[in-house]
Amino acid sequence: MSGFDVLTRGDVLEQALQARDYLVACGVPAALAAKDPRLWGRRAVDHSRLAWLDLPFASRYLLDKVEDVVVEARFAGLDHVVLVGVGADALAAQAIMEEHAPAGGAAGGALTVLDGSDTAALAFTLERLDRTLVVLASKSGVSLEGDAYLRILADAFRRRGMADREIAARFVVITDQGSPLHGFARGKGYRVGLTDPGLPAHMAALSAYGLVPAVLAGADVGQVLDEAAALAPALLNDKDNPGLLLGAIIGGCAQRAPEGLPRDKVVLHEPGGSGALSGWIAQALAAGTGKRGRGVLVLDPPGSPAELPDAHGVALNPKQGAQGTHSDAETSVWAPLGAQFLLWEYATAVSGWLLGVNPFEPGGAVAQDAEDDAASLLAAAAGGPLPAGRPVFADGEVEIHTALPVPQSADGLSAALVALLAQVPPEGYLSVVTYLSGELSGRYLAPTLARHTGRPVVYGAGPGYLHATGSVHKRGPGGGAFLLVTGDPPEGDPVADMPVPGRPYGLASLQLARALAEERALRALGLPVVRVHLRDAVEGAGRLTEAVRGLGAAGAPERTGTRARATG
């Protein structure tokens, strides 16, 4: 076995080989090797959209360029790196740190991500300001969360008696040449690292977005680039090409067959449980394929019922022994982390071609529209209550907001959940998105909900989850039903509703505005949504968990949902 292998079996193998032969016959691998943008039409993509293919080599300059910043930071005692970024901008750096964080005693080694999903990370950061260097990563402008965190952190530095010049030295900005953030950062005197505006965000793991935060935190990024560079020659081949085979597997299965369901869902099995690499793969496939009513949705094993007819399993680096691969997944992918990034980027491009979509088409509008709506809600509220609407009813410390018909019941929360689950179509799924400062995660709810419905349950923390994967939910095949969980800030938590300096709102209002904007966006697409609001963080979370567990004892709901098709 070589260092990079993709193996598959069963009916997936037959589909994949047919798709691979078709790709070769159509000249797809040859066109990618030549970086020919005409592969997706004359005006579909320019050469810069394919620059990710060169990053294993082109990003080498970053190591020397960032070295001076690393030395200066360590000399100043700054060994805690805080990355402010939402979605794809943060996942690659997290994956690198999970795999290549320096051993104890080495310089650096601490990376904290602030993405708006949990204020505990902000509290952790504020306790370590004296040793903190902040990295803001965004391909365009400053997000709502980025603006809030920049203001809070700059104000905290200022309260420690630091001058503006000293504060500026604590910030590093990674953005595109000529972006609004570029001008903002220059005006503040921040260090700025620039990238190619044509580089797609979901293909930027080996660019400054993924590498610089990890370098500053002490990771061996040179090894990551070595791993990717070792794979690159194989991607120039026609048949002996692991990226082509993986793309043929993913895209070939996702194509609608004359008989049966398209297998447009991938269950990722990562050793030790899903980590940042799985999250990064999920957003790459979602952003690259989720458009024009098509797309590939990545599932996590806890929310995946067995034997789904429209899903297949992919194991990342499964263990091997005398009896073969220790995995029940139909497809296994072996590659070190840097090669995994490049391999999945290539597979995403190939999958998109097979599905008839442009995998490099800018999809940022899906996330940006919801963010703009959240900004409008905050501006209109002017520091007052947000227009959250009247709940359909309340169940203890839980308010239920939905447009679905929910019968009056003594157990209103369970009735609302049953009504939502009944909307999940036979080919659909449930998505649980939490906008909370507490520790309640959709991961705790997913297994029971999946057993009850017999359909997969995906989950994540907002706003990062829908920011990263919203394209496949909103522009993909449809079929999603959405449970959004919001809540009042926990009592006694000084950070959960911390005021944002210079803004008429605090973090709790910002988080709620994000949820309300996503709720409106999903409803506008005709997708079924239930939002539950926890008026008491602890009691409400307990009540929601109890209601979900109660569903496990009931039979599966009678389905009334249809497979909606979102447009974009």
Image (cartoon, rainbow, N blue to C red):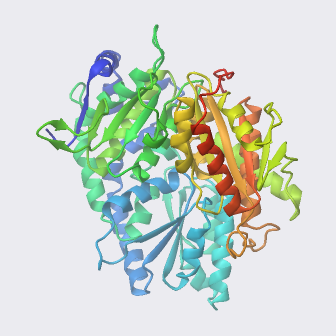
- Residue 43, image x, y percentages: 54, 27
* Left or right placement of residue 209 versus residue 64 in this view: right
Determine if residue 35 is in view: no
- Residue 198, image x, y percentages: 51, 44
Q: Nearer the viewer, residue 116 or 180?
A: 116
- Residue 121, image x, y percentages: 56, 69
- Asked if residue 443 is positioned above or below residue 193 in the image, the reply reads above
State the residue lying farthest toward the left: 322
Pick the quarter of the image with the N terminus.
Answer: top left
Q: Quadrant of residue 440?
A: bottom right
- Residue 195, image x, y percentages: 48, 55
Pick the quarter of the image with the C terminus.
Answer: top right
Q: Quadrant of residue 25?
A: top left
- Asked if residue 164 is positioned above or below residue 180 in the image, the reply reads below
- Residue at (53%, 30%) from the top-left corner? 455
State the residue lying farthest toward the top: 258
Q: Nearer the viewer, residue 14 or 207?
A: 14
* Left or right placement of residue 370 versus residue 182 in this view: right
State the residue lying farthest toward the bottom: 161
Q: Nearer the viewer, residue 522 or 398?
A: 398
* Left or right placement of residue 330 versus residue 73 in this view: left
- Residue at (83%, 50%) from the top-left corner? 388
* Left or right placement of residue 558 versus residue 30 in this view: right
- Residue at (62%, 38%) from the top-left corner? 551
- Residue at (63%, 88%) from the top-left corner? 163
Determine if residue 269 is in view: yes
- Asked if residue 499 is positioned above or below residue 250 in the image, the reply reads below
Query: Number of labelled discs?
Result: 0
